[in-house]
């Protein structure tokens, strides 16, 4: 089933999920299967067994940024365009500066940055939309 988290209390490690029909189900972190902690408003998928929620996982929220991140990392990755697009401005600026200075000083830093961009391109392509959204959008994971 699909739904969203209405409430979550960190102290008691319990919360309430609403499914698409408006039914409410209580849950605790023992049923939570994701690496990140539950957040109010997050879209989730879950299994309902005997009226109880089990195996809750976070799903993507809205349109995935994966396609544009993949394209930007392939064509403009060396200058950090994909980092800026995903909202990692410090990392994007770092890649841009290292690329420009590397271009001026014998090209070695630029080549390293280009290799990093290609590695990130391959990682982005290999991840599913849900994993990409969770890792790079929801959990704010700036590198690899």
Image (cartoon, rainbow, N blue to C red):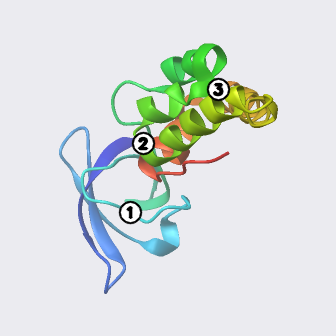
The disc label shown at residue 89, or none: 2
20 horizontally vs 94: left or right: left
The disc label shown at residue 38, or none: 1
> In terms of sequence position, does the residue under pointer 2 or pointer 1 come before the other?
1
- Residue for point 68% across, 24% down: 125
The disc label shown at residue 78, or none: 3
The image shows residue 127 at horizontal and vertical percentages of 67, 33
Mark 1 or mark 3, which is nearer to you? 3
Outermost residue, front direction? 105
Q: Which sits in the foreground, 100 or 118?
A: 100
Q: Which sits in the foreground, 118 or 131?
A: 118
Q: Secondary structure at mark 3?
A: helix
The disc label shown at residue 136, or none: none
- Residue for point 33% across, 29% down: 62
Q: CA distance from mark 3 to mark 2?
A: 14 Å
Q: Are marks 2 and 1 in contact (CB under 8 Å)?
A: no
Q: Quadrant of residue 1?
A: top left
Label 3 CA crowd tier, 10 Å (few <14, some 14–19, many 20+): many
112 horizontally vs 121: left or right: right
Q: CA distance from mark 2 to mark 1?
A: 26 Å
Outermost residue, left direction? 22
Q: CA distance from mark 1 to mark 3?
A: 34 Å
144 horizontally vs 108: left or right: left
Q: Quadrant of residue 104?
A: top right
Work out whether 100 lies above or below 5: above
33 horizontally vs 85: left or right: right
């Amino acid at each position: 089933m699909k739904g969203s988290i209405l409430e979550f209390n960190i102290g008691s490690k319990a919360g309430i999920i609403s499914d698409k029909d408006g039914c409410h189900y209580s849950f605790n972190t023992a049923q939570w299967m994701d690496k990140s902690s539950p957040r109010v408003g997050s879209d989730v998928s879950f299994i309902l067994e005997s009226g109880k929620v089990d195996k809750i996982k976070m799903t993507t929220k809205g349109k995935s940024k994966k396609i544009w991140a993949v394209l930007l990392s392939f064509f403009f990755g060396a200058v950090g365009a994909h980092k800026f697009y995903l909202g990692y401005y410090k990392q994007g600026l770092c890649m841009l500066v290292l690329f420009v200075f590397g271009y001026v000083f014998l090209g070695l830093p630029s080549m390293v940055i280009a290799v990093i961009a290609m590695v990130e391109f391959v990682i982005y392509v290999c991840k599913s939309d849900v994993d990409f959204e969770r890792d790079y959008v929801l959990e704010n994971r700036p590198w690899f």
